[in-house]
Amino acid sequence: MENNCLTFLTPTLIDGTRNWTHLINHEMSHSWTGNLVTNSNWKDFWLNEGFTVFIEDKNTRNVLGNDKGQLIFYEH
């Protein structure tokens, strides 16, 4: 769930296996862009998710490197 300064996580996501890293990255990206770039109606919802996925991809590539980031981007 998006909030300007806070991301809510359920215990299911925090299991210590790093299986949910991409989801946490996505929700953190919503915190940075989801509430700043928003849609005026549901037809334009792609703006919200589009900018979020862009930032999510940038975060992944910065942490894991360009090659691994590109692989993960195409997996999802």
Image (cartoon, rainbow, N blue to C red):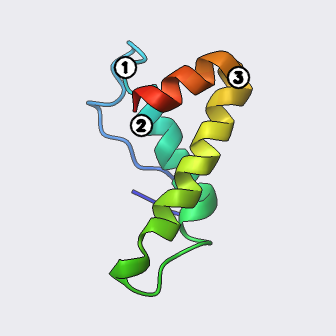
Q: Earlier in the sequence, mark 2 or mark 3?
A: 2
Q: Say which of 19 and 72 sits in front.
A: 72
Q: Secondary structure at mark 1?
A: loop
- Residue 69 vs residue 10: left or right? right
Question: From what the image shows, is residue 23 above or below residue 44?
Answer: above
Q: Which residue is mark 3?
A: 66
Q: Is residue 4 visible?
A: no
Residue 35: percent from the left, percent from the top?
Answer: 55, 70
- Identify residue type, mark 1: Asn
Using the image, tell me which numbered label, if any, was put on residue 3.
none
Q: Within 10 Å of the Cα at label 2, are there few (<14), some (14-19), or many (20+) other Cα atoms?
A: few
Q: Which amino acid does the dot numbered 3 rest on?
A: Asn
User: Residue 13's image quarter?
Assistant: top left
Q: CA distance from mark 1 to mark 3?
A: 20 Å
Query: Residue at label 1?
Result: 19
Q: Quadrant of the N terminus?
A: bottom left
Density class for disc 3 (Cα within 10 Å; few <14, some 14-19, many ≥20) is some
Q: Give the numbered dot on residue 23.
A: 2
Q: Nearer the viewer, residue 64 or 12?
A: 64
